[in-house]
Amino acid sequence: MKRRVMLGAAGALALIRPLRAQTGGFPSRGVSMVVAFPPGGQADVVARPVAAALERHWKQPVPVVNRAGASGEIGNASVARAAPDGYTLLMALSSLAILPEAARLFGRQPAYELDQLAPIALFTADPTLLVVPAAAPWRTLEEFIADAKARPGAISYSSSGNYSALHVPMAMLTGAAGIDLLHVPFQGGAPALTALLGNQVQALATGPGPAAAHIREGRLRALACWGARRLAEFPEVPTLIEKGFPEAEFYIWAGVFAPAATPAPLREALRQAMAAVAADAEVRRALAASGNTLDYRDGDAFEQFFRTDSARLQRAVRRIGKVE
């Protein structure tokens, strides 16, 4: 047994040593992790414990850089155009695949294309939740929809911007249920949640992370979720699929990307670092405390997930059409 362990360790070192040689001792300085939204939203909530664990792993600073604007286009594009040297990463949300398609609807040149970014690792992939203030009159999804039908345009909801990861799922619901809600876009998930908590709007589709504590503490009520199955943390909350809306499926995932031209050895070094971070007990505790479930995938598993989800979201954007 001891001999097998020693041989296994020697084999691992044999793989790591040439990788280190090919990557030039990466990282030799700080690595920036860009979040294309303000602090406090889903991407930020996941990025911060991941960045902290990378600092411990690499012994180099990993600042989280909030580069918000245009529903995430500005931050996403900044990484797509960054030097492919591994020192600029993106913690992206599912809206990454939505925004270029939305730009094309308006005849605009997209700020970036998906093939300019390389998927490295997925950390979370939770369905969005439909949440309302605890003092709202609706206790069920059916009551919410019935009221929306009775008062077209009277119920408002916030989002992180047009075609964002908080807008598209709600647009899916309004289309499927045949209801008209008033959309109030903000410059990020955190301001959208603040607006709901401050009674500026009456509903929000959000990732479970930012909303979980408010639900547990009785400030918000969850009426439904956009998943194929119910969330383990909120087993009492029904899915929209089981309520008769089979096309209303949306996951607000958070994953790390690098510029597409990043050399393969550097991508592998990044992947290995992310795998180590996913096994870090502090990361798991931080994600659980923020209401997120670790759903780590890398390599082919993340590539396949990203392709499948991106195709679904692009179809959804085309169905939604132009939103002025």
Image (cartoon, rainbow, N blue to C red):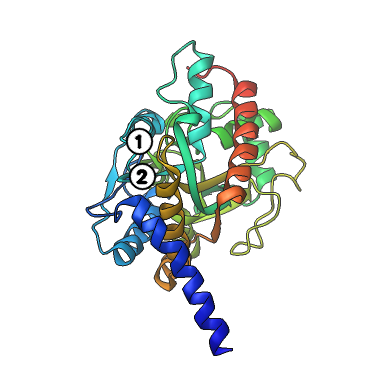
**Mark 1 secondary-structure assignment:** helix
Judged from this view, the residue extending furthest toward the bottom is 2
Q: Position of residue 153 (x, y in %)?
A: 55, 26
Residue under label 1, please give it: 79
Q: Would you name the residue on which mark 2 appears?
A: 89
Q: If you read the primary sequence from the N terminus, does the residue marked by circle 2 or circle 1 appear first? A: 1
Task: Describe residue 183's horizontal placement relative to residue 240 as left or right.
Answer: left
Q: Are marks 2 and 1 in contact (CB under 8 Å)?
A: yes
From this view, report whether residue 283 is shown above or below residue 64: below
Picture layout, residue 287 above or below residue 94:
below
Disc 2 from disc 1: Cα separation? 7 Å
**Is 198 on the left-hand or right-hand side of 123?**
left
Residue 310 x/y as whole percent: 59, 35
- Can residue 163 be seen by looking at this rendering? no
Q: Residue at x 41, y 56 (%)?
A: 19
Mark 2 is surrounded, within 10 Å at the Cα level, by few (under 14), some (14 to 19) or many (20 or more) other residues, namely many
User: Which disc number belongs to residue 208?
Assistant: none
Q: Residue at x 35, y 38 (%)?
A: 84
Residue under the point 61% across and 50% down: 301
Residue 245: percent from left, percent from top: 74, 39
Identify the amino acid type marked 1: Val
Q: Secondary structure under badge 2?
A: strand
* Image label count: 2
In the image, residue 321 lies at what x, y percent?
Answer: 59, 18
Q: Nearer the viewer, residue 192 or 156?
A: 192
Q: State which quadrant residue 251 falls in.
A: top right
Quarter of the image where one finds residue 49: bottom left
Q: Quadrant of the N terminus?
A: bottom right
Q: The residue under label 2 is which amino acid type?
A: Leu
Above or below residue 79? Residue 207 is below
